[in-house]
Structure formats: structure tokens, C-alpha cells
């Protein structure tokens, strides 16, 4: 995964990867594996400020929250989606988009559905 190092994250931002990932999420809505890996990529890239800016510009949180709704029984997807929401909602613009997408309701639903998954609980609490 190229987006786990800061250099890889910067390269992903420069290449417009967040927008491309969001486009793939919109095209392949029923593909849980793609949605999960897309959320993971957004989480990783949005760790950097410029990655968060790119995620805000692409309105990535809208696709992430949509995936959370469609795949509410996929604990792994919900875990990485919560991480993505957490990294996107750092800035005021990211928080506003997360609020408009009703991200908090989806994060709360994930926390409620998977109370015994420590990693999901940590990611969800970070998002809230």
C-alpha cells in the first residue's frame, strides 16, 4: 500500500487519487471489497493535511458515509470508514461536510452494532 508513508500519501494527493477513488466508489457501489479498500485509502491519504484537503475537495466523506449505510454488516469496512471520517473531519470544512452527510449517525450506528470490536470502537470514537 503506497499510501502508508508520507511520501506515498503526497504522491497520491498529487496524482489526484482521492478523486479517482471517489469516482470508483460511485461507479461500483455494490462491490464491498472495493468500498472497503477505498475507505482505507481515503483514511490513509487524509492523514496528511493536504490529503484531508483533497478529501474535502472531492467530498469523499459523502462516498464513505454512503458505503457505511450500504454495508452496515461489514465490520472491517465500518472500521476503516470511521478512520476515514476521523481524518476528513479535522478541518472546519471537513466537519461541515461530515455533518451534512450525517456521518455521526453512521458512526454511532457502527459503534452500536459492533461493541466488542476494540479497533472499530477506537476508530469510531476518534471520528466523533
Image: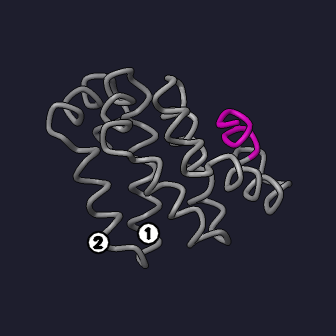
Identity of the residue drawn at 30% across and 34% down: 54
Give the distance between the C-alpha atoms of the residues marked 2 and 1, in whole angstroms.
13 Å
Position of residue 72 measured from the top left corner of the image (x, y, whole percent): 65, 69
- Left or right, 80 with respect to 51, comes to right
Residue 124 is inside the magenta segment: yes
**Mark in the foreground, 2 or 1:** 2
Image quarter where the C terminus lies is top right
Q: Secondary structure at mark 1?
A: helix
Residue nearest the observer in this picture, 92 or 5: 92
Which of 4/57 is in front? 57
Disc sitting over residue 27 in the figure:
2
The magenta span reads: 121-128
What x and y, as percent, mark residue 121? Answer: 76, 44
In the image, is 19 to the left or to the right of 124?
left
Q: Is residue 96 magenta?
A: no
Q: Quadrant of the N terminus?
A: top left
Residue at numbered disc 1:
33
Residue found 23% across the figure and 33% down from its top = 13
Question: Which of the 4 quarters of the picture holds residue 9?
Answer: top left
Looking at the image, residue 69 sits to the left or right of residue 121; the answer is left
Amino acid at each position: 500500500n503506497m499510501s502508508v508513508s508520507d511520501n506515498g500519501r503526497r504522491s497520491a494527493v498529487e496524482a489526484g487519487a482521492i478523486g479517482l477513488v471517489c469516482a470508483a466508489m460511485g461507479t461500483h457501489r455494490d462491490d464491498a471489497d472495493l468500498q472497503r479498500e477505498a475507505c482505507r485509502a481515503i483514511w490513509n491519504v487524509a492523514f496528511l493535511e493536504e490529503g484531508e484537503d483533497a478529501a474535502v475537495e472531492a467530498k469523499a466523506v459523502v462516498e464513505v458515509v454512503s458505503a457505511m449505510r450500504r454495508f452496515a454488516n461489514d465490520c472491517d469496512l465500518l472500521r476503516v470508514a470511521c478512520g476515514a471520517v476521523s481524518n476528513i473531519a479535522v478541518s472546519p470544512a471537513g466537519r461541515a461536510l461530515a455533518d451534512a452527510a450525517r456521518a455521526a449517525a453512521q458512526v454511532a450506528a457502527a459503534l452500536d452494532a459492533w461493541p466488542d470490536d476494540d479497533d472499530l470502537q477506537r476508530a469510531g470514537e476518534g471520528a466523533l
